[in-house]
C-alpha cells in the first residue's frame, strides 16, 4: 500500500514533467535554466529520485512558483479548515528539513503559512526566490535560526520575527544543538 508521502512524490514528479512540457522546454533547456543536470531532471520526472529542498527551489524559480503552490498543485483543493492531521508534510531527510503546509495556497488567495523544522547543523541555501518580490514573515517558534536574504544575515531566537521582500538568494541555518521550528507567512506580490 502506498503512503501519502509516496503519493505526493509520485504526483509531484508527474507535475514537474507537465510543467516542463507545458512550456515546451526540453530537459536540456530546463537544465540550462536551473543549473541541474539533465540526468537528475530525467530521473526526477521518472520517479527514480526524491527531490531535495534545494532542487525543488531551483525548479520553482524556473517555473515562477512558490514551493507551497507547487505542492498544492499535486493535491486536491484544500478545504477552508485545514486540520492538523490533513496538512501535507514533506521531508528532505538528507538536508535535515521538514516542511508542513499549515495553510496551503488556494486560488484567489495570495497568502500561505508554512512550518519549517531544521535539525541541528541543517543549512539550506536557495539560489533565488520562486517569485521575485514575494513577501515573507519568518517567526521562530522554538530554537535559533539564521536567515540570510539580500546579503544580510539575521540571527533569530524564539519569538523573533523577520519580515522582508525576497529578491535575491536566501539561506536558512539551524543555530545551536536543538532543532529550530519556525513559521513562514508568504504573501505573493
Image: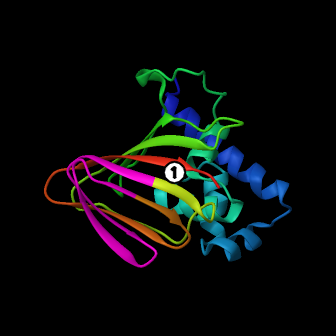
Disc 1 is placed on an element classified as loop
Residue interval drawn in magenta: 137-162
Residue wearing tag 1: 50
Q: Main secondary structure of the magenta part?
A: strand
Q: Residue at x 57, y 51 (%)?
A: 67
Position of residue 172 measured from the top left corner of the image (x, y, whole percent): 36, 63
Q: Look at 67% across and 53% down and name the residue there.
A: 45
Q: Residue at x 34, y 49 (%)?
A: 139
**Position of the C terminus by quadrant:** bottom right
Asked whether 104 or 6 is in front, the reply is: 104
Q: Is residue 163 left or right of residue 31?
A: left
Q: Vertically, is 37 above or below 111?
A: below
Above or below, 8 relative to 136: above
- In the displayed structure image, the side of residue 156 where residue 166 appears, left or right: right
Answer whether residue 153 is magenta in the image. Answer: yes
163 and 15: which is toward the camera: 163
Does residue 46 appear left or right of residue 162 in this picture?
right
Quarter where residue 31 is shown: bottom right
Point out residue 113 in the picture as x, y percentages from the top left corner: 48, 40
Q: Nearer the viewer, residue 186 or 14?
A: 186
Dot 1, crowdedness within 10 Å: few (<14), some or many (≥20)? some
Amino acid at each position: 500500500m502506498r503512503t501519502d508521502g509516496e503519493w505526493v512524490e509520485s504526483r509531484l514528479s508527474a507535475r514537474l514533467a507537465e510543467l516542463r512540457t507545458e512550456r515546451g522546454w526540453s530537459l536540456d533547456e530546463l537544465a540550462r535554466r536551473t543549473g541541474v543536470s539533465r540526468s537528475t531532471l530525467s530521473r526526477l520526472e521518472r520517479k527514480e529520485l526524491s527531490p531535495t529542498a534545494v532542487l525543488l527551489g531551483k525548479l520553482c524559480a524556473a517555473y515562477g512558483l512558490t514551493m507551497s503552490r507547487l505542492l498544492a498543485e499535486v493535491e486536491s483543493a484544500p478545504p477552508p479548515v485545514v486540520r492538523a492531521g490533513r496538512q501535507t508534510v514533506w521531508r528532505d531527510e538528507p538536508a535535515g528539513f521538514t516542511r508542513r503546509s499549515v495553510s496551503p495556497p488556494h486560488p484567489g488567495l495570495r497568502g500561505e503559512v508554512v512550518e519549517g523544522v531544521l535539525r541541528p547543523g541543517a543549512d539550506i541555501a536557495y539560489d533565488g526566490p520562486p517569485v521575485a518580490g514575494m513577501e515573507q514573515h519568518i517567526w521562530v517558534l522554538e530554537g535559533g535560526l539564521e536567515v540570510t536574504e539580500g546579503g544580510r544575515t539575521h540571527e533569530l531566537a524564539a519569538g523573533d520575527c523577520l519580515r522582508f521582500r525576497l529578491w535575491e538568494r536566501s539561506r536558512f541555518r539551524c543555530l545551536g544543538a536543538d532543532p529550530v521550528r519556525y513559521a513562514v507567512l508568504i504573501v505573493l506580490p
